Amino acid sequence: MGPDLEATERGRGRVLTVSTIGFTLMFAVWLMFGVLGIKIRDEFGLTDVQLSWITAVAVLNGSVWRLPAGIAADRWGGRKVFVAMLVFTAIPAYLVSTATSYGVLLVYAFLVGFAGNAFSAGIAWVSAWWPQGRKGMALGVFGAGNVGASVTKFIGPAMITAVPAGGLLFGIIPSGWRSVPVVYAILLIVMAAATWFGTPRHDHTPGKGRSVKELLAPLKHARAWRFSLYYAVVFGAYVALAAWLPKYYVDVYGVPLSKAALLTALFIFPASLLRPVGGWLSDTLGARRVMYATFGAMLLASGVLMMPYGHIVVLDGEGAANEVLPWHVGVVLFTVLVFVIGCAMGIGKAAVYKHIPEYFPHDVGAVGGLVGSLGALGGFFLPPLFAYTTSWTGLPQSTFFVLFALTLVAAIWMHVTVVNLLHTASPALTHKFEHDQHITTDVAEAVPDVPRATASTRPAGATQ
């Protein structure tokens, strides 16, 4: 290995390490209301629907700028864009701690939600540095920064309890739930400095010199929008559940907030840390098979969780009522099934993003930004939808009916698309799901006998 190659290896290693740590922090900031929301609800006297909108507006702002952030990283370099995003997010993070009314808190929550857009900038940055044959694992490692959703779950309750009434550092860090956003603001500034000085000054800019129209051209293909729906299932729903589960545990099972946060972490960890495993499985088995397994596991687990609790009443000959087949999901079974959903989501997120650098190698920022943006919007719409369906039905289990229905729609669309492509290629290949390069790049995952390298010669944006 020559000196230039060694420097490149060190550079891409630093980019991956620093960007993953930074993304983990930004993700923690983005979803901090999942834990802080309980204390905020108590202080401001909010309803569950009002509380759900605090989380929702943060998720919204963390979704809508993903496409511009990805394009900006491709054009001007991920290092500059990532640092700018860290510095900007620190300002509203601090302001959250100063809110004195629900309306003001909504505004600050929306602004701090900008942290969520770091994903598409980081994806474009990492992808630009890593070679094609190693992108899957590198992007999987970066994506594992989703574990940041559990950071507040761990440190939030402890910090709220530990900070004295007078605050710390001469009152710079206030007491109660307000201490958490202030600490995050400080950490964001420190992370911005570490990113600026700890990564190579020279950056790769695959979108430099290209017009915005050229960068957006791949978005006209239905494939990119279909991937966005898949990502809404495995990521948008993940974001929504990460914020919703602490309240669910507290309200349905009556567990204390600290325990609810730990139980929620059992969902967040596999949904984040299994992302590299999902990338490896997609390389080995094929991303389409991984997506089938993901949707199947989610449908099975959410199908059980959405069932109302109760029993069947049987009347005997004398009119006496007997209760049979009692059905109830206790906290242990609930946690196990949510853990299964988390595992499926963690693996499925990698399977969705495995396709983007292969189908759109020069447009990872734009396509990855679109998929990330529309997928994350699921995290905006789902918490209010959880709250409204629970209010309408009176059943907290309706949360998982919403998840089941969304997953079913995505699974049906995927299956119909695959079957149609197979019938187009040859009716005899209906039951084969990997690698055919003769129709479209999507069919590259349908027939196992043709070398994959042939597919890479097709135009990245070939029509579906």
Image (tube, helix red, strand yellow):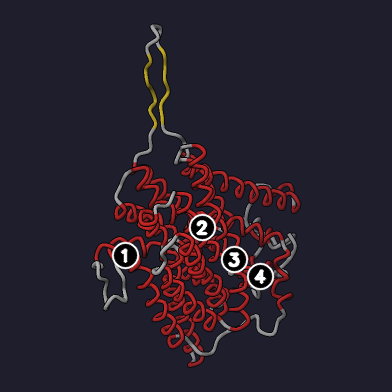
List x then y, in percent, for residue 260. Answer: 33, 52
Instruction: Kindly state the secondary structure of the residue where label 1 is placed.
Output: helix
Q: Residues within 10 Å of mark 3 (few under 14, many from 20)?
A: many
Name the mark nearer the viewer: 4 or 2: 2
Could you tell whether 265 is left or right of 420 in the image? left
Residue 423 x, y percent position in the rendering: 73, 49
Q: Secondary structure at mark 4?
A: loop
Q: Position of residue 337 (x, y in %)?
A: 41, 45
Marks 4/1: CA–CA distance = 39 Å
User: Residues under labels 3 and 2: Cα distance?
Assistant: 12 Å
Q: Label 1 near label 2: C-beta < 8 Å?
A: no
| Tag 3–tag 2 contact (CB < 8 Å) | no
As measured in the structure, the alpha-carbon distance from the residue carrying label 4 to the one carrying label 3 is: 21 Å
Instruction: Please state the total of marks drawn on the protein image.
Output: 4
Outermost residue toward the front in this view: 101
The kind of secondary structure element at disc 2 is helix
Please, is residue 266 above or below residue 162 in the view? Answer: above
| Label 3 residue SS | helix
Q: Which residue is mark 2?
A: 56
- Mark 4 crowdedness (10 Å alpha carbons): few <14, some 14-19, many ≥20: some
